[in-house]
Image (cartoon, rainbow, N blue to C red):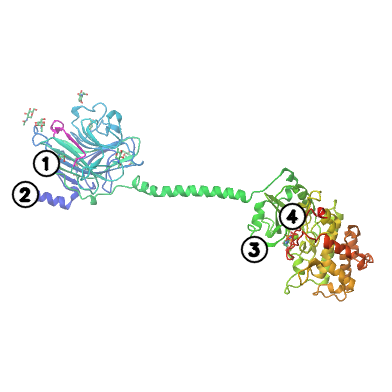
Amino acid sequence: MKHLYFALHLLICFGFPSLCTSEDRFVYSGFSGTNLTVDGAARVRPNGLLEVTNGTVNLYGHAFHPAPLHFRRSPNGTVQSFSVFFVFGIISVYRETSVDGMAFLIAPRKNLSGVLANQFLGLLNNNNDGNSSNHIFAVELDTFQNTELKDINDNHVGIDINSVHSIKSQPAGFYDDTSIFRNLSLNSGEAMQIWVDYKEETTQINVTMAPLKMAKPVKPLVSATYNLSQVFMDPAYIGFSSSTGPISTQYIVLGWSFCMGCPAPVINVNKLPKLPHLGRKFPSRVLEIILPIATAALILSVGTSITLFVRRRQRYAELHEDWEEEFRLHRFSYKDLFHATQGFKNEHLLGVGGFGKVYKGVLPTSKLLVAVKKVSHESRQGMKEFITEIVSIGHLRHRNLVRLLGYCRRNYELLLVYDYMPNGSLDKYLYCEEEMPTLGWSQRFHIIKGVACGLLYLHEKWEKVVIHRDIKASNVLLDSEMNGRLGDFGLARLYDHGSDPQTTHVVGTMGYLAPELVRMGKASPLTDVYAFGSFLLEVVCGQKPIKEDAQGNRFMLVNWVLQHWHNGTLVETVDRRLQVEGVLDEVCLVLKLAILCLHPSPTSRPKMQQVIQYLDNEMPLPDLEPTHLSFNELRLMENKGIFSSGMSYPPLTTTSIGTISGLSGGR
Ligand SMILES: Nc1ncnc2c1ncn2[C@@H]1O[C@H](COP(=O)(O)OP(=O)(O)OP(=O)(O)O)[C@@H](O)[C@H]1O
Ligand SMILES: *[C@@H]1O[C@H](CO)[C@@H](O)[C@H](O)[C@H]1NC(C)=O
Ligand SMILES: *[C@@H]1O[C@H](CO)[C@@H](O)[C@H](O)[C@H]1NC(C)=O
Ligand SMILES: *[C@@H]1O[C@H](CO)[C@@H](O)[C@H](O)[C@H]1NC(C)=O
Ligand SMILES: *[C@@H]1O[C@H](CO)[C@@H](O)[C@H](O)[C@H]1NC(C)=O
Ligand SMILES: *[C@@H]1O[C@H](CO)[C@@H](O)[C@H](O)[C@H]1NC(C)=O
Ligand SMILES: *[C@@H]1O[C@H](CO)[C@@H](O)[C@H](O)[C@H]1NC(C)=O
Ligand SMILES: *[C@@H]1O[C@H](CO)[C@@H](O)[C@H](O)[C@H]1NC(C)=O
Ligand SMILES: *[C@@H]1O[C@H](CO)[C@@H](O)[C@H](O)[C@H]1NC(C)=O
Ligand SMILES: [Mg+2]
């Protein structure tokens, strides 16, 4: 009969492990479909987890095996040996912080009304705590240190008899094979195993703990001797209790087995329902990975933005001074110019001159084509005068001046914004390679007249005299109608101030510098006329004002022209690419006018007003013989003066500023 019962029991256990219960032995492999008695915040989840308390704070809950158990064989007998095994998990919203704890419980009844949550773990209340009439035995898994209860720490396992003051407790953990203690964190969010064993003979209570999937350690975690025969009522109920405090914590039982008088049945832990990883483990591990990355990314992005911001500020930083207020309307923002030229891209470079680079650009709002000249300039000296002058001239419109639209200042940099001249500078046509079509005489003559008008305007037509200081073919730009327009007016002034000839740096371009300018360093409208003379020769002869012969000797173009004039071969000086038939008079007029303008004595040079009259044939050129100009004087000048020792020419290919200092002292 007994054998039959055992066989039947085995069959039930085998077929329905989660329902395998008998009066003194049961296995809960998950709690789905079981008939636990639950109260408070306890419930069985659909997936089979027993939630003794759900996440709600300051609650308690109980879950009991429904049937009463007889721990005594007879009403006056002693409490038999028993063995309990369960798998639990504690899941808190905060990592490794939870309140208050849970307990395995043996109580005289399932109706535990009047108990308290929090530190009382849903077992007792402050009136009955410690009263032997409670008949309560519990193994507490306490995750909060209540000093009034003399808790050893916030992560301990204790044996409780009628009180939440444990008779014995130990920090959670286990002893490994070599009896070395290993910590475990009750609220790590991991499922863990607990064994509770009682031996009738020795009245010894052993509580053993281990991580999941680990065999029961030999050495128990907590061991106490207490005669439970003096505690248990008969019958008694066994179950779980737990309570939450102010932190949302779930106390969960995954599986549970019990045996009276035999070791607790083994549960296949792999078949247990899985702990949720929502509130804890999963996010925390994800956070462990993501948080540092996110933090790093954040720091990086903040750093990058700050750097970019600072860079931006630096990139677009400008220099403003109080006196500039009146030129506000002529001021461009660096940012606009930066964008107009696509960051001063090399593709947009129009050319490089003595003062800096010139870029082509499109103004962002007006879509106007502009040429932006970047002038590097270290000192602020003379800047006010310069800007005052060029801005006031620049905003005047004259068909033979390149309009200056405005400027922008930065540290060490001045940016000048001009109308873009689609046909570029005249020098490109004069000294171009064979492929490029050169300009015919009528075009050249038209340009010469235009430049003369522009220069006259600067010298005489405006309220004050403006000296161009750098007339030459590369500063004559051609608009869409091939009108010659003077550009770069006054720019040389920026580099040319101070009246002491000893320290004056003459600025201009070699071959265009009047002798008195070199000697005295004093620019005047007549030094412009001299340069204009050089320019005329440039246009007619198609050659630079300083020639170089086959032997590498350099000499003035004007002297070569004079020589030819003297020899009666003036026509030979004309650019070979020009067709001069029928216009020879005009060509010769220009050549002679050029020579007149190049007169070493400033007072002998014509004024621009007269130059225009000569060009327009309104007035005949003064009858000059080639000897009229002191040829020798020029020679002398050439030998001892401008081109004498201590002065080197700039390479002929570059038309750059000739800076000659202290020449007057050299004589
Ligand atoms: N407004 C403009 N429109 C179109 N091209 C221009 C304009 N200004 C200048 N350029 C081009 O840029 C080149 C460089 O001009 P830049 O004035 O800097 O040098 P430069 O005239 O040769 O010498 P300098 O510095 O003595 O004036 C010119 O040769 C011309 O081709
Ligand atoms: C937890 O249980 C209590 C009591 O049954 C209930 O009021 C509360 O809504 C539950 N909380 C959750 C999150 O299920
Ligand atoms: C569940 O247990 C209660 C007693 O706690 C009992 O009345 C009920 O019949 C049981 N139900 C099942 C399905 O076992
Ligand atoms: C059990 O003990 C009680 C007193 O503690 C006594 O009255 C009762 O007769 C005893 N019963 C048995 C069966 O021994
Ligand atoms: C539980 O016990 C209390 C008294 O302690 C009683 O009032 C209550 O009705 C009982 N509840 C159940 C369900 O038995
Ligand atoms: C213990 O509880 C019982 C009944 O609840 C009560 O009569 C007794 O006074 C309590 N003892 C102490 C020490 O509180
Ligand atoms: C174990 O716990 C003790 C005290 O709680 C602590 O000092 C020790 O660092 C912990 N060891 C490990 C490995 O967690
Ligand atoms: C408790 O553990 C000790 C040490 O391993 C062992 O000797 C004893 O038999 C155990 N007692 C019970 C009730 O398991
Ligand atoms: C435990 O207590 C009971 C009486 O309450 C006694 O009969 C029994 O001998 C005790 N067991 C041990 C091992 O002392
Ligand atoms: Mg120029």
Alpha carbon separation for disc pair 4 and 2: 113 Å
Is residue 376 visible from the viewing direction of this image? Answer: yes
Does residue 220 appear left or right of residue 666 in this picture?
Answer: left
Q: Where residue 347 is drawn, which disc sits there? A: 3
The verdict on label 2 being within 8 Å of ligand 3 is no
Does residue 421 appear left or right of residue 94 in this picture?
Answer: right
Q: Quadrant of residue 169?
A: top left
Is residue 242 visible from the viewing direction of this image? Answer: no
Q: Name the secondary structure under disc 4.
A: strand
Tell me where the magenta segment starts and ends, as one range: 219-234
Sequence-first tag of 1 and 4: 1
Pointer 1 residue: 261
- In this view, the mark in front (3 or 4): 3
Q: Amino acid at mark 3?
A: Glu
Q: Amino acid at mark 2?
A: His
- In this view, the mark in front (1 or 2): 1
Q: Quadrant of residue 593?
A: bottom right
Sequence-first tag of 3 and 4: 3
Report the front residue among 390 and 277: 390
Q: Name the secondary structure under disc 2.
A: helix
The reply to whether the magenta stretch includes residue 603 is no
Alpha carbon separation for disc pair 1 and 2: 18 Å
Q: Name the secondary structure under disc 1.
A: loop
Report the front residue among 550 and 505: 550
Task: Bin the neighbour count of mark 4 within 10 Å (Cα to Cα): few under 14, some 14-19, many 20 and up.
Answer: many
Pointer 4 residue: 405
